[in-house]
Image (spheres, grey):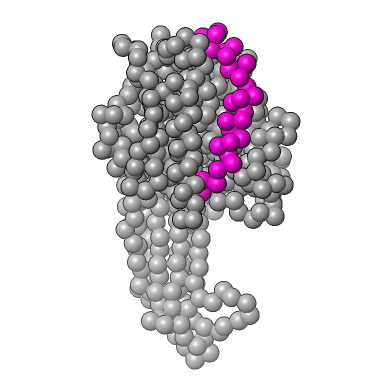
Amino acid sequence: MNAAVDFLRQNRAKHLQWSVDLCRIPSISTKPEHKDDVRKAVEWTRQRCEEAGLKARVMDTGGHPAVYAEWLGAPGKPTLLVYGHVDVQPTGDLKLWDAPPFDPQVKGDWLIARGSADDKGQVLIHVRAAAAWLATEKKLPVNLKFLLEGEEEIGSPNLAPFVHQHRDLLKCDQIVISDTGMPDDGYPAVTIGTRGLAFRELRLTGPKQDLHSGSHGGIVANPVVVLAKLIATLHDDKGRITVPGFYDDVREFSAADRKEINALLPDEKKYLGELGSPAFVGEEGYTVAERRSIRPTLEVNGMYGGYIGDGSSTIVPSKAVAKVTMRLVPNQSAVKIGAAFEKTVRERCPKTVSLEIPHVEHACDPYVSDRGAPIMKAAAKALKESFDREPAYLYEGGSLPILPMFKKELGADSLMLGFASPRCNAHGPNECANIRDLDRGAEAVARFLAYAGG
């Protein structure tokens, strides 16, 4: 293990160049014109896996391809599957970037480029650790597999069928993912929970077409008004969601858990300033830290209807639409909550308009890791030795549908070791990664492999 760590320290410059080179590839998976770039990023990653000493190949998924790599020379030892992605988000407004997004810049401790944090820099942490072991010991302490895809930023539409089709190839004892973050630079973390998600779209129709508001206003229902009133019923004045049964299965966390969660929130005033919002809102009886991680939410992601262009158009609109997502916490079911939401909305919607709720598959249950599992203890030991402090244990407010999918298809739990800075601007302009934390992350993974192997 010490030799592997020394190798990583001696090869920091080379490995930083790996990150630079991969981040140069504009692998924007959502844009058809970048289809070849996604494949190029996948092929580049395959080459680095082989350079590290892994057996690797590019595999088709039905969409953008993926890298599969393996080293299986440790009989009797656990098999770990590293999952990650090498596709990236679009650049957004280029005027907001200090340099072109795919022209990586190294400024002090920071690598600035699209994908540097999400997820190219973090993916390479694991390749670097494998390379260090194979270069120094000619073997790994565990059996190791990689599945690195090119569709995560578009919702991984082909991942579940691919995993189902290749269950024998991907069979493992534990999945390891580095696509999350840390509470502060130099402060290692294990994410032990993610919220689930239930999505619904509400479509209201009043008259069969837009009508002249002078001739017909006041005698037919305006679907925009009806929708606004309907949405307004979904929360009470204490920030509670009013869907009957919504909180029935919500897990209540212990006082000790809540104390730990609250200790990780940055200064609330500073945090509010970063958000640019006048004030915090939310469910009474819970702190900001708790509301953003271990309490369920219901948010309207968008509403539209009628005329919204320049100037005026005096109409009674024919249609109005709202998109709603509910973030779910441990013990809640996406199917159950989605059904309860639909029932509530249908009961509350007046007969003066028609309501349509299209069927959707966009849902996942919450996920919680076993904090007492041996693999968790191995990770904590490796992180402490590499960062010289105990790791934080985080509950992520977002959702990762792949976690319950992996559990269902492979029967394996997921360990989330994230090394992204809270200031990484993932998905935004000037995305960046803290180079020191990428280096320490690689050392942590090298140590983790040793401890995971017993």
Front-most of residues 203 and 37? 37
Q: Position of residue 124 (x, y in %)?
A: 52, 29
* Number of numbered labels in the structure image: 0
Q: Position of residue 155 (x, y in %)?
A: 42, 47
Q: Which residue is at a point 62% across and 77% down the rendered structure image? A: 310
Pick out the residue farthest to the right: 108
Front-most of residues 142 and 380? 142
Front-most of residues 317 and 2? 2
State whether residue 411 is above or below residue 164.
above
Q: Which residue is at a point 47% across and 20% down the rendered structure image? A: 130
210 in magenta: no
Image quarter where the C terminus lies is top left
Q: Position of residue 294 (x, y in %)?
A: 49, 36
Q: Which residue is at a point 61% across and 45% down the rendered structure image? A: 102
State whether residue 348 is above or below residue 159.
below
Would you identify the image quadrant in which residue 383 lies? top right
Examine the residues drawn in magenta and state their main secondary structure. helix
Q: Which residue is at a point 49% across and 72% down the rendered structure image? A: 305
Q: Position of residue 413 (x, y in %)?
A: 36, 27
The span shown in magenta is 1-28
Front-most of residues 219 and 444? 444
Residue 237 in view of the camera: yes
Residue 258 in view of the camera: no
In this rendering, position of residue 62 left or right of residue 18 = left
25 in magenta: yes
